[in-house]
Amino acid sequence: EEDCNICNFLFVTIQIAVFLSVTQTYILMNLVDVLKVLELSEDMEGVSLEAGLCTSRSDQDVTDLSYKIDKKIQLSAPTKQLFPGETPFPVDFSVMTTVRPVKGSQVFLFSLYDPQGTQQLGVELARSPVFLYEDHNGQPSPDMYPIFRKVSLADGKWHRVAYSVEGQSVTLYLDCVKVETLELLRGPDPHVSTEGVSVFGTRLLDEAVFEVRQIHTCLCPWVWYKMTSVSLSRAAISTS
């Protein structure tokens, strides 16, 4: 509970700074609930509702709930459902999740594939997690994917995880604290296709289990910081 209250406080302070230049209305208009699009439900086999990261908060009576995934599951939808019309996948973006994988597991929580089946984006929850990103020209190559060796995202605990991609770098934030910035050696005008499919739960390995509440997309590069304190038992993707 103390941890939840701290992050609620962080949200208040950051909200003031962010909204000097961007309004909350803009954020809400560009927010997409990915799990809603993919129709994840506790009625599915292997999916159940559990208590989330914060079981109680001083300012709310509602308990956070999360989806517990206890077997291999794969949900997919055309990426165009996340980015409708002529909306492109942004060059700079943030990827966020609040999740609890089983200790020692290796999980790709969310992935984007192009029409040829190439994985262009992958959010991995593992020891020394890889941030999988590949633009339309195949850059960076797999041997150059950023690997965050200073942390483990598979220690069996709840974590707020945020990747912020800007230019030629990607920064990892863990539990609202900056961990490390690594090079992301993509091309000068990188593109991620919206003509393929978006997949939740792809490449789950063996008996990997995790809990997650939501995944969002938003056309704002800095929303990761807001979401790390707001979405206390959620997964999210924020883009710009």
Image (tube, rainbow, N blue to C red):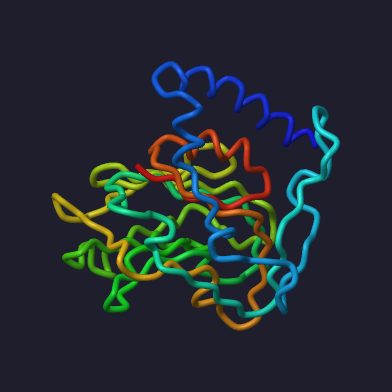
Q: Is residue 99 left or right of residue 91?
A: right
Q: Please, which residue is most extreme toward the left here?
A: 188
Q: Is residue 74 left or right of residue 166?
A: right
Quarter of the image for residue 152 reads bottom right
| x, y percent for residue 112 | 39, 66
Quarter of the image for residue 15 reads top right
Figure quadrant of the N terminus: top right
Return the residue nearer the eye: 224 or 179: 224
Q: Is residue 155 above or below residue 53?
A: below
Q: Please, which residue is most extreme toward the bottom here?
A: 206
Residue in the picture at 39% in, 19% down = 21
| x, y percent for residue 191 | 22, 57
Quarter of the image for residue 83 reads bottom left
Residue in the picture at 34% in, 58% down = 146
Figure quadrant of the C terminus: top left
| x, y percent for residue 120 | 32, 66
| x, y percent for residue 98 | 61, 50
Q: Is residue 58 left or right of residue 12?
A: right
Residue in the picture at 34% in, 46% down = 165
